[in-house]
Image: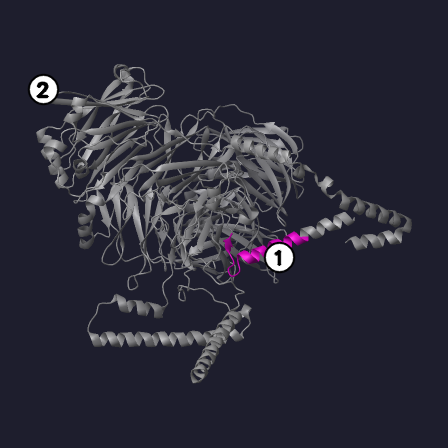
Amino acid sequence: MACCSFSVSSKAIKVNIYQSLVGQVDPKETPMRQQYVGKVRFAHFDMHVQSSKKVLVATEKNVFASLNTRTGEVYWRHVDKTGPEGNIDALLMHGQDAVLVVGNGRLLRSWDINIGGLNWEIVLDSGSFQSACFVGQQDSVKYVAVLKKSAVSLHYLSNGHQKWVENLPERYVIHRYQAVYSGGNGEVYTLGVVPHSHITIVAYSVEDGEIIKQISVDAPWLSNIQASCAVVGQGMLICADPATVSLYMLDLNVQSQMTQIPLQSLGLEVSPGFQPTVVSTQPNPARPPHSEFFVQLGPDHYQLLQLNNGQIVALRDFKPAMLVSFATTGEKTVAAVMAPKNKTVSYFEDTHSFLSRACSLNLFSAESGRRLLDTTLIFNMDPNGGKPEKLYVQAFLKKDDSVGYRVMVQTEDHTLTFIQQPGRVMWTREEALSDVVTMEMVDLPLTGTQAELEGEFGKKADGLLSMVLKRLSSQLILLQAWIAHLWKLFYDARKPRSQVKNDVTIENLSRDEFNLQKMMVMVTASGKLFGIDSKTGTILWRHYLDNIPSNAAFKLMVQRTTAHFPHPPQCTLLIKDKDTGLATLHVFNPIFGRKSHITPPALPQPILQSLLLPLMDQDYAKVLLLVDDQYKVSAFPSTKNVLQQLQEMASSIFFYLVDSSQGRLSGYRLRTDLSTEMIWEVIIPTEVQRIVSVKGKRPNEHVHSQGRVMGDRSVLYKYLNPNLLAVVTESTDLHQERSFVGILLIDGVTGRIIHEAVQRKARGPVHLVHSENWVVYEYWSTKSRRNEFSVLELYEGMELYNSTVFSSLDRPHPPQVLQQSYIFPSSISTLEATLTEKGITSRHLLVGLPSGAILSLPKMFLDPRRPEIVSEQSREENLIPYSPEMPIRTEWFINYNQTVSRVRGIYTAPSGLESTCLVVAYGLDIYQTRVYPSKQFDVLKDDYDYMLISSVLFALFFATMISKRLAEVKLLNRAWR
Amino acid sequence: METTGSANVSVPCWVMFFRSRAPVLIPVRMSCLLSFKLSVFSTVLLLLCTRFVCCNNGRRVGDALDAEFSGFSVPLEHSFEVDDVAKFRVRGALVLKAGREPSVSLSQNQLSEEDRTKLKEVAAVDGLYRIRVPRVFLQADRQTERQMEGYLTAFVRACAMVESHLSDVIALHTDVSGYLIGVSIVTFPGACRGTEVEDEVDLEVFNTTLSIMAPVNAPGPETALFLERMEQELERKGKNPQEQKSFFAKYWMYIVPLVLFLMMSGAQDQSGGGAGGGAANGGGR
């Protein structure tokens, strides 16, 4: 007993220490983390309690989560494996159970939706998943049926155990069972189709899986049941056929022929070329579906129909209508219809867009098709967003027994918007941010006053007097601002600290003293761009680029920073279709997100390479060169000034191309007429190895010291080649004895192979960082079955060849290459190095681990000069003795308990403080923080004693004054003597 | 990567006199485990000077011929044009010898009068001096399999070539399985300073240092050595009896009274009954 209590208290102490440590590392700043779930595939509102605030979502990112409908926050979230293994095939909800089919029918899981706990999980038999549904009897739902390609199985909802499994009768090779249905009458129907021939319906008994009946009906027009059919009413299968423009009806209970009902006979018309679909609703799985259903007749045309005693009756026509959805509360079923607000607006076939940006939603009674009073809801579409794609309706009964509702609208840009009547947006979730592809951090603009002063220097001089006046006026403005600032300080000081809140809006954005707050410009795979304030994580602007190809590659470049005041900052996004190579440019202002008025050049040819030159045009925009597949170069901007500069510089502009499919690396030089000539070529045969990645150095990197001081006070100079490329290859032979990873260091200008090494018995994926004079890479060792880090460092030797300037063309001596490897006890997701303003601060490596932690690993541990045997000199140099294993120390984690799921990339940016590096990790989540690799050496501590220092200073000053006076008196006295 | 072999220069003395103005061969530091030999044969009467620069694995001079016979030859081509449109012509022949440690030697002609003037012209307009070799597979058995489609190219500035008096260093790189993947050329010195060069004397013969390089094996984690060192340290500690003492042996004088004390107090508790035990437990917290 005593022992037990002791251990508890020691744990408590540990927690306390950890928390205080946390406080120590981050005294002023709270890191920002945002959690996302991804693009929603299935969503269900929790209906089993009337006042529930949950919506359950299953997403394309293999995430199953519960969201708070009041705030949009994540209650809980389960992140499954990436790829098809964790793919969520189906989500069924009943009561407080959510049943998921995962990994193409591999697993069946049941979750408790209140707490997000797993009720049970079972492994299903192999076979590709087709469909799943609940099976009920006598108004209670007890089973879940899962239809696989060749078998159907029934499982208890309470524990997942299999009640029975039956192989599907298969008469034809091309027989495909596609849907499973149960109407609560003790039978389970599987619907199969032999495309363009007939439908097969097999009914099983719920009790023992015995085949009750088997029907085969000719349907030569049908190819896919799930796409064009639905079960309506008391087991009536209704299919739509675009060829004959008619509906087909088949009673599942009675073996019969399909009845054809031409849509014209109902007075309906289908838009030409449109495949009509049937939408039905089955709110309770223990009962048959409702007899009302929608038929979509065109992109913006829906028709509500009713099945009445075997006859189809048209209830109401909805045109224009963008989206429809059924919702049930209690015994009432309603249909929600979203329509463009302005009735005169039409749908444009060519652009697939509605002109109107506002939509109105209305509820209609499902039974009668009548509009319910006071149910209009206005949805204002974001002009920078996509158009609505899916509609999820949460209906509830009001006190007066009328139906109220809220809707969740999913738009093309993966945004979820939750709206309450009459149009109040409760929350929005930008799920596009779960798939950030690339990002940049841009300095915020100066405040108006600072900008005014800057502008004074930017303008051209126009006379002495006016310059003096301008100077005086700007200084007056500065004075005014300073007084205002003082007043604000004084005013805020009286308020308690918690009340002082600075909401960041796009209007009051300004750079802080140390440039710690920046604008994060994020590009997502969906084609939506975001501008996010790095301090608070507030989304300040968003811009959706439609018609982005699905396999697009993005490259974001900052052409003009905020430093050139009268000119706005400018970012350029290169969007390239990976298949065709065709590219487009999107030029925008990174602070406001607005599209620039500058028209980017049209790029009719596929683009091979782009490079941002340090050259600037007269408006301080860096020149972007684009190389097309004819090896012609186009410049953007392409003003006369730029072209002239390019002509002068042409002979010193080199670039390289990589064709990994042929293993070809080639170098080109620019000619004055903007054509190019090939100057070097290296070909790595693809039979043996393939190029995996090519990495240069970051252009904004500064290296402060040219060399390292050795133990004997001599200097070992670094080989700092800015044009050096690190090329990683992997062997095509994947046998564990013969596989290898190759590292090539190539000069990008001359094509000279500086170093060539192979890591034997190793395999990818290789993560690589290339900076200063070192390359760090991580690989999987097949021999020892572990992850290993390797570091390469390049040195010129004890003397520099040419200390003033580096030229790849004039560096004949090859550098000395040192290499060392270490065991790393974890696999890694991504690798990046810290970056600071002047490069004085020591470097750390930021390692994203699959566990969601981000490790800040000092580069000092990855140093090939770590000695095997400690000597006096190595101790003098502060080298850590070599040990083969790299430690992971828990205090190196920079995100404490704030794990970042599925880290895909880490972005680092320097801040105004040399000691501080800004870090953004992105994956499923976004996490922003600062790191201090050499501690905060340039910042005074919080507990810095100003009083003591100043009083000591004053005391010393007065002591000097007094002693000086005394000395004078003494001298005078001595002189008199 | 330091050179381990020595530069082996065997030149008949009358030839030495002939090429007295040519720069001394610079020892190559980058070549891996290869040593160099230079043999110069020249016929003064015919005014034809041919030089062989060959590298092999530290064999004696007489073996060089054997290497040439068992190897195979590919052309080394160069191009320097005033208009910078590449027109490759043969500069010499590379004799490659496959094997565990491949070797290469080069026989090349001297520059003609016409070429010398052209090279100087190209240098004056800051043109490029390019070289290229065909792609080959060294480990193939048959000649037909050796040759592959395409060339590997590299360049230096023509002025650097002129100012270094045609002293260049050519390196051929192979991959793991013996495919030639790249060629590089640098000159010593590498800079263009605009110094005047007399073409008759300085631009006649190439002074080429040649090497062929296979990838080095990157080291894995050095566990064996580390363990050895650890063991040594342990042994050293073992020799020192002071440190060998176990925890208990060191501190028995503190532990024994403590244990005794605890046992005594435990015995008291048991005899003291339930109330006393409860109090003791409370105190333990």
Chain ID for label 2? B
Residue type highlighted by circle 2: Leu
Residue A609 x/y as whole percent = 29, 42
Do we see residue A369 in this rendering? no
Between disc 1 and disc 2, the foreground one is: 2
Quarter containing the C terminus of chain A:
bottom left
Chain ID for label 1? A
Q: Secondary structure at mark 2?
A: loop
Q: Is residue A19 magenta?
A: yes
Question: Share a chain, discs 1 and 2?
Answer: no
How many numbered badges does the structure rendering display?
2
Q: Is residue A429 above or below residue A732?
A: below
The residue nearer to you, when weighing A820 against B281, is A820
Dot 1 crowding, Cα within 10 Å, few <14, some 14–19, many 20+:
few
The residue nearer to you, when weighing A424 against A436, is A436
Do we see residue A942 in this rendering? yes
Residue type highlighted by circle 1: Ser
Q: Is residue A889 left or right of residue A243?
A: right
Residue A186 x/y as whole percent = 64, 36
Q: Which residue is mark 2?
A: B46
The residue nearer to you, when weighing A784 against A595, is A784
Residue at x-position 29% and y-position 67%: A455
Residue stretch in magenta = A12-34
Q: Which residue is mark 1?
A: A51
Q: Is residue A816 above or below residue A327?
A: above
Residue A821 x/y as whole percent = 47, 36
Q: Secondary structure at mark 1?
A: loop
